[in-house]
Image (cartoon, grey):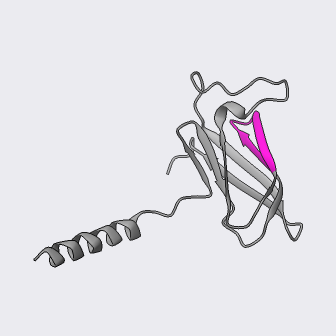
């Protein structure tokens, strides 16, 4: 009896995990921006732009890896930092160059209606 219950719980857990949508390459949560390179090529000169003005980035992002940065680390060209208590994220753009020299561009626009 106990064995059946354990199997049922295991099967339900696997079904639930399989039904979850795969996370996108750009995620925002708990005031942190996460970017995942879901390609098979490394990226270099990665620039992340939040709300068209606040920038951050990394020199490289390896294939299959993820980078995360607090929103408070993003800043404008004039040095103004993103204020998480006063602003909401409505758009994120990621640009980079892959290992073959091809441009990479990802966008998350929360203003778009589905």
Q: Nearer the viewer, residue 106 or 14?
A: 14
Residue, far front: 2
Relative horizontal placement of residue 4, taking residue 32 as reference (left or right): left
- The quadrant in which residue 88 appears is top right
Residue depicted at 84% across the width and 24% down the height: 78
Q: Position of residue 27 (x, y in %)?
A: 58, 49
Residue 54: quarter of image: top right
> Where 56 sits versus 45, above or below?
above
The quadrant where residue 53 appears: top right
Q: Is residue 17 left or right of residue 76?
A: left
Q: Residue shown at 68%/28% (left/top)?
A: 82
User: x, y (%) of residue 111?
Assistant: 57, 41
Q: Please, what is the dominant secondary structure of the magenta stretch? A: strand
Q: Is residue 43 above or below residue 67?
A: below
Q: How many numbered marks, from 0 up?
A: 0
Q: Is residue 54 above or below residue 41?
A: above
The reply to whether the magenta stretch includes residue 17 is no
Q: Residue reaching furthest left?
A: 1
User: In the rendered structure, does residue 47 fall within the stretch colored magenta?
Assistant: yes
Magenta residues, start to end: 46-58
- Where in the figure is residue 4, as x and y percent of width and height? 16, 78
| Closer-to-camera residue (112/55) | 55
Image quarter (top left, top right, bottom left or bottom right) of the N terminus: bottom left
């Amino acid at each position: 009896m106990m064995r059946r219950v354990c199997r049922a719980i295991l099967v339900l857990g696997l079904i639930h995990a399989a039904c979850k949508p795969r996370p996108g390459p750009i995620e925002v949560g708990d005031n942190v921006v996460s970017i995942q390179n879901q390609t098979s090529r490394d990226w270099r000169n990665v620039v992340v732009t939040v709300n068209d003005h606040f920038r951050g980035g990394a020199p490289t992002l390896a294939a299959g890896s993820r980078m995360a940065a607090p929103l408070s680390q993003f800043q404008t060209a004039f040095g103004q930092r993103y204020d998480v208590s006063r602003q909401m994220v409505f758009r994120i753009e990621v640009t980079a160059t892959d290992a073959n020299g091809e441009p990479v561009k990802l966008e998350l626009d929360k203003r778009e209606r589905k």
